[in-house]
Every structure is written in structure tokens, then in C-alpha cells.
Image: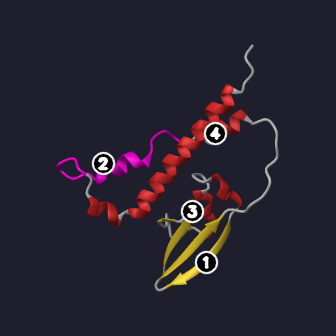
Amino acid sequence: MSRVFVYDGREFPDPDSSLSVEDVRKQLSDFFPELTNADTREEHRGGEVRYTFARRIGTKGAGHPDIVKILRRVPEAHLAVFDLVSQLMDTDGELDAEAAATRQPEINLASAEAESYGRATRSAVDALRRIPQP
């Protein structure tokens, strides 16, 4: 059976069928930190199993940000979205809509990575701005 992973209404491809569902959730939490403690729901549909991740609602403690931890959450600067866009361009430099339609799970994952990079970068910049000036 094929596996599909769903979070926030978006489908993501199975990165490796040998990984447990828990391992896949941990990988996605690199892009969506709120999935670190997410609940998982399993649903069988035809020939596939859909795993839907839902974040748990809780309270977050206050305190000073650990700048090193924040900086470590900023992903590597080479984003998959750039490679994917170049693969989806036709010979005239236009987006190949048919090819894009067949690769929606990859597009979702690349988008999540780019969004995560943006959030992590903003968080790091905000933390650095809060450092008291001498």
C-alpha cells in the first residue's frame, strides 16, 4: 500500500517507505516545528494509507529565547524549490503545467521547506535584534 502524509490540508510524498510514520513526522517537523508533538490519524482509502498530522494545542512557556537554538533551526540555504522550478520549466522558459500537476506532493514539500526557511530566518533576525546593545 502506498502512503500519503497530510498536514494543514497539504499532501506530502512518502520520503522513504522503510521509515516509520513517526520518523516521517519527525522529518516534517523540520519544516513545521509544531509537529514535534503532533497527533497522527490513520485512514485507509483504496490502495493507500493516509496519515494526517494534527498539532496539539497547549501552552507555551515564557522566557528568553536561546539564540543558538533559534539559529540552528534556520535550514540550509539551498532550497529544493529552486531545483523543482527549473525541472518544471519547458524549453521556452514557461512553467509546464502538466508536469507541475503530476508533482503536487513535491511542490507541497518544497513550499513547506521555503516557508520554514522564512519563518526560521525571521525568528533568528528577531532574536538578534533583541540582544541588548552595549
Crowding at label 4, few (<14), some or many (≥20) Cα neighbours within 10 Å? few
Contact between labelled residues 4 and 2, with CB atoms less than 8 Å apart? no
Residue at the image position 58 percent from the left and 58 percent from the top: 28
Q: Is residue 75 visible?
A: no
Residue at the image position 41 percent from the left and 57 percent from the top: 107
Residue 8 is tagged as 3
Question: Which one is in front in this view, the residue at disc 1 or the one at disc 3?
Answer: 3
State the separation of the CA atoms marked 1 and 3.
Answer: 15 Å
Question: Which one is in front in this view, the residue at disc 1 or the one at disc 4?
Answer: 1
Q: Quadrant of residue 58?
A: bottom right
Kindly identify which residue carries mark 4: 72
Please indicate whether residue 118 sits to the left or right of residue 126 in the image.
left
State the separation of the CA atoms marked 3 and 4.
Answer: 24 Å
Contact between labelled residues 4 and 3, with CB atoms less than 8 Å apart? no
Element marked by disc 2? helix
Kindly identify which residue carries mark 2: 86
Pointer 1 or 3: first along the chain: 3
Kindly identify which residue carries mark 1: 42
Residue at the image position 75 percent from the left and 13 percent from the top: 134
Q: Relative to 119, is 50 above or below?
A: below
Q: Relative to 51, is 106 above or below?
A: above
Kind of residue sitting beneath label 2:
Ser
State the separation of the CA atoms marked 2 and 3.
Answer: 26 Å
Say if the magenta span includes residue 134.
no
